[in-house]
Amino acid sequence: MMADRASGLWFSIAPLLAGFAVLALAGVAPQLYLVQAGSLLLAALLIWLGARSEGDVMPGTLQALACLLVLLLGAPLLAELTGLTADAPQRWLQLGTLQLYSGGLLLPAILVLVAVLFQQPQSRAAACGILLAGALFLALQPDAAQLLALTIAFPLLYLQACRPGVSAGWLPLGCFVPLLALCYWALQQQDGLQSVPYVEGVFALAFSVAWWSGALVIGAAVLLLLVLYRQSLLDQPWLAAVAVYYAVLYGGSVAGATPAPLLGYGAAPVLGFGLMLGLSLWLRQRV
């Protein structure tokens, strides 16, 4: 796919492969393998398209794309208006018979877009609005894990926008206080969803089989974080914030509180990773 400085991203396939091993350990139905494999193929297509795309970014394109993704992030809240899912978390985009976890699908790409918009002085106000709108939607769903990951990743979003002799300004920094407030509120809300061993409980599941299988799953997660961080030092600085985002979610999954992206079952996190990485590769030569 890439023969340049981004070739190290090939190692990010490790947690995806580990995800299939987790499904095998859990003894899931064959159709779950098909969903996971189909998601992986679509994610690979998104990454390939991002790496091969040519042409300049039209003015306003990134803002429009970020707004679209944030609106999709908040779309599950519309289900509450029907009254059919009262008192239940509103976190899924319904596509026919397929449900996609909106935070896992969209938030990684939103992080990349906000990071790039923070680098552009004329777009910082819009980036702040986009970021806070996304945080509000996550709080209302409520999705405390995704909001916590966003809040902890935010300082790196701000710092990567600061270059030698250039400050990102006070406006983006001011987003941190409302982020903290929304995060605190979301953490106080009850989550009625039960933990599933091959979704939220992948680390416990792997260690329940053998210590070495648990070590392999942890190693796959750590490898992904290192790959993203290394790439952030080369040509895609926003990937440091993405690495922190995934690290927070992995930490939450150890406690069984949130899905483990890529390591457990779920089409949305796999597609979200492909969307994020494809977008990142598309932007690296254009900003």
Image: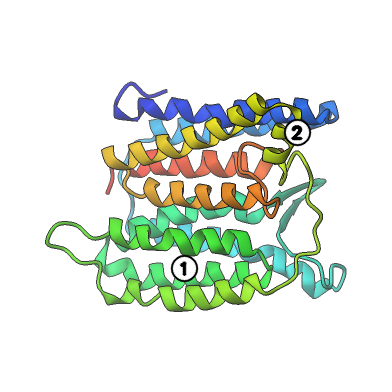
Residue under the point 49% across and 31% down: 12
Residue under the point 27% across and 62% down: 120
Q: How many marks?
A: 2
Location of residue 208 by image quarter: top right
Circle 2 SS class = helix
* Circle number at residue 120: none
Image-based side of 109 in relation to 235, left or right: right
Residue on which the image places disc 2: 208
Residue under the point 77% across and 27% down: 25
Q: Earlier in the sequence, mark 1 or mark 2?
A: 1
**Could one spot residue 37 in this view of the protein?**
no
- Image coordinates of residue 229 in percent, x first then y, are 37, 41
Residue on which the image places disc 1: 130
**How far is disc 1 from disc 2 in space, using C-alphas?**
41 Å
Badge 1: residue crowd in 10 Å (few <14, some 14–19, many ≥20)? many
Scheme by which the image is coloured: rainbow
**Could one spot residue 275 in this view of the protein?**
yes
